[in-house]
Amino acid sequence: MSSEIGVPYLGANATADAVADALRDAGCVVIERAVTPDVMDAIRDELTPYLDATACGVDEFVGYQTRRTGSLVARSQRFRELPVHPLVLGTLDRVLGDHATSYQLHLTQVIDIGPGEPGQMVHRDQWAFDFFPFPNGYEVECHTMWAMTDFTEENGATRVIPGSHRWEDKLRPGIDQTVAAVMPKGSVFVYVGSVYHGGGANNSDAHRLGVNIGYTLSWLRQEENQYLACPPEIARELPDDLAKLIGYRRGAYALGYFGDLQDPMEALHPERNASPTFNAKP
């Protein structure tokens, strides 16, 4: 089985409907130059001490020449613009929010693929949920990969099989069935959790850096523990929309309360005397 379609490309002025349509058709889409390169440079500058301190992976899947640096909300103020990018959230409203009460931030990490790293095993991100066989067409997860450097065939651009979100689960496609999501710095590759993909091989002499931000339905466990990555003393300084997206809110009627059935935002801002009115949307 192989893909008969390529990666769709849209401009930064695309509508959320157009991005959502591309995801439904291909399971992935590149939005070119969604932010300016200087935004990615500013994020990289703030994260440099953490990037430099991160060790490479310990197995083939995470990559022996690949570094993965997390806790980005707490570590970089400029990064905080990306998880709540209006076009991304508008797309999520259509792809995840159309069949669930709410969605949440799943993970944040810079993935730095170093020279000489081979291609990653082709996989589905939703396998993280203990390989649970979600119904075909019912998306529970959506990811973004922001280009902190240019993504090229040579330096390890993410590889994907467009249309494979409709395939059977637990397949083992080969890298030869994939195509590269090539894109310039500041662009974002958006893909659903059911599409088969993997990190590309870095055959260049430079590092390929991408900012991976994932989102899931709020009744699923987050891959990155956001309450340790961004504890209350930091979360209370965040804009409300980002704090709620991290998970400082109820994810459904009775999910995620604290104390005496209180909303998590009351823990961050007890001085507000928050209303008990329930609103799960980000």
Image: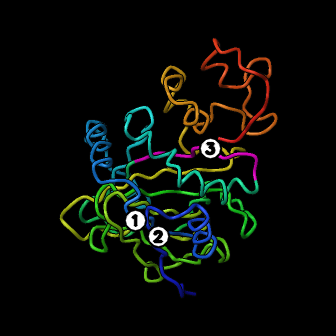
In the rendered image, the quadrant that contains the N terminus is: bottom right
Number of residues whose C-alpha sits closer than 10 Å to that of mark 1, classed few (under 14), some (14–19) or many (20 or more): many
133 and 248: which one is in front? Answer: 248
Location of residue 93 in the rendering, given as x and y in whole percent from the top left corner: 66, 53
Mark 3 or 1, which is nearer the eye? 1
Label 3 Cα crowd, 10 Å radius (few <14 / some 14-19 / many 20+): many
* Residue located at (56% from left, 60% from top): 125
Q: Main secondary structure of the magenta part?
A: strand
Q: Is residue 78 shown above or below 272?
A: below
Answer above or below: position of 141 versus 106: below
Q: What span is in magenta?
A: 100-109
The reply to whether discs 2 and 1 touch (Cβ–Cβ < 8 Å) is: yes
Label 3 SS: strand
- The kind of residue on which mark 2 rests is Leu
Question: Residue at 62% of width from left, 72% of height from top?
Answer: 165
Q: Amino acid at mark 1?
A: Glu
Residue placed under numbered mark 3 in the picture: 104
Residue on which the image places disc 2: 10
For the residue marked with disc 3, what is the amino acid? Gln
- Comparing 107 with 123, the one in front is 107
Q: Which residue is mark 1?
A: 32
Q: Nearer the viewer, mark 3 or mark 2?
A: 2
Judging depth in this view, the residue of 133 and 47 nearest the camera is 47
Q: CA distance from mark 3 to mark 2?
A: 25 Å
Residue at x-position 20% and y-position 61%: 206
Q: Earlier in the sequence, mark 3 or mark 2?
A: 2
Residue 163: x and y in percent read 59, 78
Specify whether residue 113 is painted magenta. Answer: no
Q: Residue at x 52, y 26 (%)?
A: 235
How far is disc 3 from disc 1 in space, using C-alphas? 24 Å
Q: Are marks 3 and 1 in contact (CB under 8 Å)?
A: no
